[in-house]
Structure formats: C-alpha cells, structure tokens
Amino acid sequence: MEFNSPVGQTPLDARRVVTQPLDRIDGPLKVTGTARYAYEYRDEFPNVAYGFVLGASIPKGRIEAIDTSAAERSPGVLLVLTHETMPKQDGKGRNNAPQMQGPEIKQAEQAVAFVVAEGFEQARSAARLIKIRYVASDGQFDLAAVKDAGKSVKNAPDSTVGSFDEAFTAAPIQIDATYTTPDQAHAMMEPHASIAKWEGDKLTVYTANQMIHWAQDGISSTLGIPKEKVRVQSAFVGGGFGSKLFIYADPILAAVAAQKIGRPVKVALTRPQIFNHTNHRPATIQRVRLGAGRDGRILAVGHDAHSGNQPGGSPENAADQTKALYAGENRLIRTRLSELNLPKGGAMRAPGEAVGLLALECAMDELAEKVGIDPVELRILNDVQYDPEKGPSRPFSSRKLVECLRAGAERFGWSKRDATPGSVRDGRWLVGMGVSSGYRPNPVQTSGARVGIDRHGVLTIETQMTDIGTGSYTILGQVGAEMMGLPIEKVRVKLGDSDFPLSSGSGGSWGANSASSGVYVACRKLRDTLAQKAGFNSTDVAFADGRISVGGRSRTLAEVAGPSGVTVTDQATFADMEEQFVQASFAGHFCEVGVDMDSGEARVRRMLSVCAAGRIINPKTSRSQCLGGMTMGIGAALMEEQVVDGRFGYFVNHDLAEYHVPVHADIPDLDVVFLDDVDDKSSWLKAKGVGELGICGVGAAVANAVYNATGVRVRDFPLTLDKILPGLPGQA
Ligand code: MOS
C-alpha cells in the first residue's frame, strides 16, 4: 500500500496502546541475559570453529611476501586464508565487502589473513606467527594538512541562492568563523561479529547488523551466490549508530572459511580492530559565514564543509542542515572532499547534522552576541516555515522549532541567564547556559510485515526490521496491538531475519516510522480478511478486547481465525513527496555547564531537550533515544576524538579506555520533553524519526554554555580543558 497523500483518521488515532509509555517487551530477555547476540549462539553449533582476523599494520602500500607456514603448524589450526588463497569476490555492489583480493593495502587493519582454529586463543596466537613483508607507500592522514580545499562532489552540488558574496560583504553584522571537528567512533557496545554455517549450497549468517536486506545483498553478491541462498539473522543488536549499516570482514571471511572446512565458523572483531577496520565519522573543517542586519535578521548564510575519505568514499555532509534551518535571501552552501588514507569514513548517528550543527549553532551564538540579542530570540527571529532555497511553494510538513525554543526557555529558566560571559560563579565553578536548535530530516523507506492471528487469538508480527536498542520490538508490538484491538501481552514480535518480509531496517532515523507503517498496512489487510471471514461485510467493524464486532454482533479473533489461523503480508511504500514538503524533526536544546576555574574542565550540570518529532509512538523508548543522543552530543562537545598516528595512519586510541565517551559520572539528570506534533504528511503513523534528532545540535548548546560560563570561545572540538584553560581569567 502506498502512502501518497496526507492521512485522515486511522484506527491508530484511538491511542489505546500507541503513544503509551510501555516498557520494552524484550526487556526481560535483555536483563536476564537470554536475548542472544550474533556471537552468542552456541547450542546450534556444537562443532563451531573460531576465526581470527589479522589486520594490516600499514595504512597504504602492498604485501610483498606473506609466510603462513608457522601459523598453519600451530596447535588446533584448521585453515589459514590470505589473498593468495581467497576465492575471487565481487567488489562492485554498494553493499559488497570483498576481502583479501590482492596484495594492495588501502587502510590500516584491512584484513590480510584469516586464521581458523578449534579455539579462539589458538586462532589468535597462530595469527601472530604470520610473517608479512610490506612495502609501505606515503599516505595522507591529516585533513588539516591537506593542501587543497577539496573537490566538489557530484551528490552534494553547491547550493547558491541570491548573491551571497555581495550580501555578506554589505551586511552590517558579520560572523566569519571556522570550526573543526575530529574523527569520531561509534563505540557501540556489541562488537561486530558473525557465525556462518552452510547446509549444502545454502548459507546462514548470524551477524550484528542494522540492515538485513543490505547485509543479505552484500554477502550474496560479494560471494557470488544467489540471494535466496543466503539467510541473514540479527535478532538482537547491541548498538550500531551506523557502524552496522554495512558489512565488514567478519561475515565474509566466516562464510568462506566455513565452506572450506565444512564446519560453522564464528568470528568477532576485537575492539581495536573495530576502531580501524570498520568505519567512523570523518573529521571536518567548516567555515560558517553569517551576515545580518542590526536587528539580527540574517541576510546572507554561507557554510563550507570540508572532509576527507578514501578514494571513492563520500563526504561528511555537514552543511546540509544549513540549507533549510534559517531564513536568509542569499545563500551559499558548499561541500568539499579530499582524499585521505585513513580507515573509511561513513555514517555515524546523524551523519552531516551531528557535526554540521556544532558549527552552525555556535556561529548563531556568536552572531547573537555581536548583534546584542538573546540567542533564543535570534533563532526565533530567523525561523522560516518553508524551504528557504525554494520559497513558500515548498513548506515544511510540520515545523515547531519556535515552539521547542519557547517551551524550552520557559522550562529551563533561560531568563535567569546572564548574557555577559564569565559573570556567574558557584564556588570554583564558572557557570553558564547555552542553547541550540536541533534539526534532522525525516526520511521514510519501503517496509513490509507478515501478520497473523492464531487459534488462541495471539497476533504474531514478522519483519526483517532490526532492534538496535531503539525499541523496535515494542513499538511494532504497540502498532499491532492497537490495530487488532489486543493488549500488548497478546502480541509476539519477531525481527531481524531475512526470511521475513523486507523492511526499512534501522538507519537514518527512518526505522520507527517506516517499519511501523509496514505493520500498519499489514494489519489493515488482516482486519479486512478477518472481517470477511467473520461474515461482517461492513467497513464499520471494530477491533477491541480481542473481539471483532459490528452492530450487535461480535466474535473473538480466536474463533474467526480458526484452527489454522489467518496470516497476511503487505508492504508500505512511500510516494515521492519531496517536491511538496520538507520533512524534518526539530529540537531546542538547553544546557548549563560549570567550568572549573583552575583546571578548565567543563562539566554539564543540567540539560533539557524539547523535541517536536511527530507523533511519539512510545514516549519511554523515544525518551531513551534522546537521552542517548544527548549523551553522545555531550561526548562530541567535551571528549570524543579519534587521535590519528601520523606515522602509521591509524587511530591510536582504539579502545574504550582511550577513546573517551561520557560515563555515568559525566551525565547529570537529563530532561526530555516531546511537544504535541502530529504530522499527517509523514506516514499513517503521523510520526517522525527521533533516533538521531537527540544528538543534533546538543554539542553546540554545551559549547555555547562553556562560552557563556567563561568567555572562552573554542572552535576546535572537543572542548578539552587544555583549550579552555589558557583563556580563563588569571591564566596569563
Ligand atoms: Mo544511522 S548513522 O543511518 O545508523
């Protein structure tokens, strides 16, 4: 069923189950350790063998000689694969991940050998016995040291409206500031891991992945086998944040080895391998120029975003949100890309906006100060209800940024903020408040589901959709329960299996809205089918309390379903409404920090996010998404940074001890509010994505609070104490 026009009343509007803050239905499985993750399947694989990936120790060059003889003689070793023994694989498809196809090295920790043994320790120790002679060539690892300003990118064309240069030059108030953000790691809890098993020519892979159909496509086309012969399972995923959108060495090498030795093979990447073998959020250099009138109205907006990636890689689209967030008749938005030889850059939670808003929203803070108006008021003054590039003919489907900012300012006590930096003290802490806007597009994707009522009146929902910690199990169960008039206890949700109907998967904040739509359309079909089967030829049938009723007649779902039950499948598709509406979700973030006046250490004291993200399907799981996003935003502002070893071209702080993410002690009570926002143009759910909105802009609110606390403006993220301290009062 296609979504192609604004939706009217639906059975979901009853909101008996949908919009309720239900606990996660998979919660008990998680807290009792019975939810199984990719590496944890044991009973099914009594004769499993263990693989260990050996990664390249140079970032660029070639293997001149590789000697595996000692490894092969090592105890318990069953197989050693290298580029000399690997079967030929296809590297063309967008999801393909060919491994060890030649002697050429393109990045650190690229797989160069795969050792399979009876035990994990045996495989790891044998891998250390492999002798490799490399010829290293020079590489480029430091974006700041790249001589050129990068090349333009086909998929991110320059966006020019009016005449930016003239308007900016003529503007009475100008901000021209450059912000830098470092490489960042997803640092999700569950490592990348896979178990591969062959039965004849059929391959089953248990793997940690966000996108079942992309993984199935990538595995099948890399190995050159038909898609129907590959089953991918990913029932529980311990976080992804974009790292598990695509596949890496683990499923491919496990599959090849399993076929060669005729036994299942399991492999997990080590934490240091994850930091360098998989992808990361690339560093950026961003120049933001804002020209405004003395009243604060923006006349010219310019955002230049520069990032690097491996040859053939994509840029970090850090300037994208600037196309639509604020008004201004003259606009110049440019994306530039340079070649680097670091590990591959890619999507990490809110790719583009997460770092783009660090720059834009700090620049807005700088503009507010220069104009001399309140930063909340500056944002409200420059609100625009339509696409500022296209004009009023392309409105936002719904846009409540102003409401987010006003409600947030009220709740946070913004009026108590002293606009003069460095003027509030609490003991040895300098205290300040900051604000930022949050913005994240709201894409949707094709998504289907199979739904059935059995003879006990229990609803079972099956879809390829994944739950990466977000709450998919629960919200899909809620949608099914609401549609069929059942309590949540009468609903079973099965996810993460390529044998189920294709789904949107978890990515780009499209999961909840799209996958719920799939369940919604399938349940509509199930309602029709049951109504007909019950002999109720009416559109007025009601589904409530486990019964289907019309007029005075009523039967239980169990009766109507009969001994063999009733099962149907349908798929939600979305017409292209891009031209008609801009779809996005919005937030106002408010932060109070304390900065230690002796050490320069910044600590968040309290924080509030007010979000307008369409109908909230489950306020509890959505709030969790925001708490996670806020935590990650605080990390981006204050601590997260992958440090590049310029000699060896790899990320040297490649574990969770050295790559600093916030811990409990870094995070105070966080407050999240969702505004009433029902978007009838987004889907039958009238919902929007919330998974990435939570991080978008957060770091800028922290940085702006640090400025308000201290008067020190740091434009190089993260704001570690060494950057803040020299500017503090009394530090000559
Ligand atoms: Mo997301 S960065 O599409 O998991």
Image (spheres, rainbow, N blue to C red):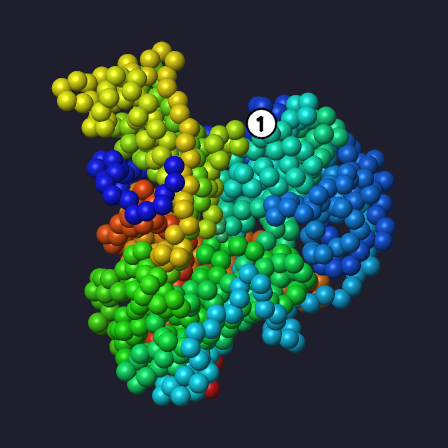
Q: x and y percent of residue 627 in the render?
A: 36, 52
Quarter holding the N terminus is top left
Q: Which residue is depicted at the point 60% across and 29% down?
A: 228
Query: Alpha-carbon neighbours of circle 1 within 10 Å: few (<14), some, or many (≥20)?
Result: few
Q: Secondary structure at mark 1?
A: loop
Which residue is the extreme one toward the left? Answer: 552
| Residue at 23% over, 41% down | 9
Q: Residue 645, how many percent across, how many down? A: 66, 64
What's the amino acid at mark 1?
Arg
Left or right position of 395 against 573: left
Residue 472, image quadrant = top left
Disc 1 marks which residue? Answer: 42
Residue farthest along the top direction in this orientation:
563
For the residue pair 621 and 505, the one nearer the viewer reads as 505
Q: Is residue 173 visible?
A: yes
The x and y percentages for residue 644 are 63, 64
Report the front residue among 696 and 4.
4
Q: Where is 321 relative to 175, above or below?
A: above
Q: Image quarter for residue 77?
A: top right
Who's the residue at 71% across and 43% down the image? 90
**Horizontal relation, residue 78 to residue 69: left or right:** left
On screen, residue 200 above or below 700: above
How many labels sit on residues?
1
